Structures are given as C-alpha cells and as structure tokens.
Image: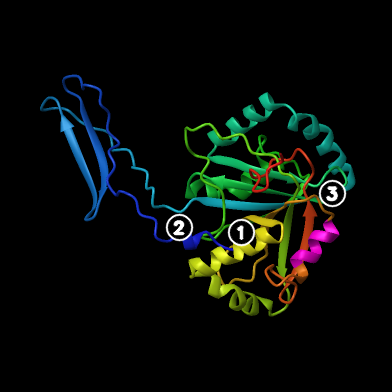
Amino acid sequence: FLLAAVSRSHRRAAKKFDSGSDETMADGAAESTKELTDEGAKVTTVAEGTDATAAPPAEPANPLAEPIFVSVVHTFVDDEKKAAWWEKMGPLMGDKEQMAAMAASHKALGYVNHYAMPCGPDGAKLNCLWECQTEDAAAKFQDFIDNDAVSPASGGTFTNDCYRAMPGALVPATGFTDAEPAEPKASSGAFFWVLHTFKPDGAAGFWGKIGPALGDPAKFAAMVEGHKAAGFYNHSFVATKAGGSDPMVCIWEAKADCTTEEFQAFIDNNDIAPGDEFLDNAVFKIAPGASVPSAMFPAE
C-alpha cells in the first residue's frame, strides 16, 4: 500500500556531469560548462582567442532530484459540462495519433500525464497522475490544469484538486526520457482508484499503524505479498506529507474482475488493507480502455 522510499531511499548516482559540446569551436569563440562536484558547482570556460566571451553555462541536470508527481482528482461541475466533455474526449481517447499529439504538447510545457482514469460517462469524478519536469512547472501546474488550452481539464468543466506526492511516494518511473514507453499489459481483472480522506483526528492513528512498514523493507515486502495473495496489487500511493492529514490517492488492481462494492469491502475491512478505522475510502472503478498502469495480473 505504501511508499517506494524503502527501495529508493538508498539510491545513489554520480555527481559529476558535463553539459558541454563535442563540436570544435571557431576562432574567437568560448564555451562554459558547469558540473556538480563534492565541493560544489564548478564552472570551466574554454576559449579560442584572447577576446572570446562565453554565455553562461547550462545548468546540469541533477539525477538525485526527486521526481515531481501530482495526483489530480477531477470533479465535474455539472451534468451538462460532463456530457460536453465526454462528447469531445471520448472519441479522442481511442485515437492513438491524436493522443500522442496531445502528450507531445503537454511535454513541451514540462508535463507528462502517466495515467488518466475516468469511471465512464456516468461517473462524477476521475483521477489523473501527472509528472512535472521542474519546480517551475510544478508551481504553475494548477494554472495549467485549470486554464491552459491543451489541458484536458480546462474550461471550467471540473474542480481540479491537486495533491503533490511527497518524496518517496509510490509512483511510476519518470516520463522525461527519450525512451519509448512500453505498451502496458492488460489486466485479467479490473483497476480502481481510491480517494482516502482522514476521519477527524485519524491521521495520527493511521500513520502510527503503517509506520513500522515504512522503514522496514522486509515488512513492506510482506505487506505487498499479502495484497497479491489476496488478489490485489497497489500500483500507486500519493500522500502529500508523511504524518499529514491531506487526502491521499491510490491506484489498485484486482486480479479478478469485481464490483465497486466488493473492492470497497477489501479496502475497508481487510487487515492488510488501509481499513476504515482512520479513513473514509471513496472507491471508483476505472472504465475499460482508460490509461492505467501495466498489469501486475496480466490477462492470458
């Protein structure tokens, strides 16, 4: 159910980067590069000619930086806007070429949409998981999702509640790479997203209950195996702060297709699930064909 911190907290990466070019400089040209070292940032300027000048060096990427993910709970403003949104977006979702063009327009602004999870034309809410490339993009994300012409949730159709994932949250690998995304495997069962809202004074009890699993890889692995043995898998968990009381969002997969009520019973009443002692768990079954994680329980 919980965090990737147990597997990522000991992550290490090289601290030295070269943003320079291999091209030969013309006479009178100069080039500066910046690298991160154990002693701090180091700038090196190479010049051809005594009067050469160099532009400020490009900032090197820092692979130690935590990816920035935002889970968005979209609530339709009214039925009229919901119908109009489905009329526009329904056909688009089945057109890979148009979806790719939309994804490219998002990425050009510094955003990647990893999952888009509507519950069907009758659903009042849907959930999306986004990634922001930079802190600047993250600071502008609410304005982007509410108002930008390329946002699928702009135009006053939704109330967009945004929850930035805390460091160590259970999220997918970054989408800001040159690699082509792998085709996700279809599930043998069904996907659900869950909006967890704390009951009054429930945060302390919840975090106290799950705390032992957070810093203990063996307990964390045992919890995951317990979920799988029960026929469920938690793909994503987004909380804004450990110990915090903001709502949290999870994405789950059921090995066998089941109803919302059946999955609700697992989430609320199973000892290895979040439970309803400290949380109100609003469960939403994701419509077939939605953009979801690659299946833990693939269809045969």
Frontmost of labels 3 and 2 is 2
- Work out whether mark 3 precedes mark 2 in sequence or the reverse, and give the earlier one: 2
Binning the other alpha carbons within 10 Å of mark 1 as few (below 14), some (14 to 19) or many (20 upward) gives many
Numbered disc 2: secondary structure:
helix
Identify the residue position indicated by label 2 in the image.
8
Amino acid at dot 1: Val
Query: Which label was assigned to residue 123?
Result: 3
> Does the stretch in magenta take in 7?
no
- Work out whether mark 3 precedes mark 1 in sequence or the reverse, and give the earlier one: 3
**6 to 130, vertically: above or below:** below
Q: Which of 192 and 101 is in front in this view?
A: 192
Question: Could you tell me if residue 99 is visible in this image?
Answer: yes
Q: Can you give x and y, in whole percent of width and height, for residue 105 in the image?
A: 59, 31
Residue stretch rendered in magenta on the structure: 260-267
Amino acid at dot 3: Gly
Q: Nearer the viewer, residue 95 or 104?
A: 95
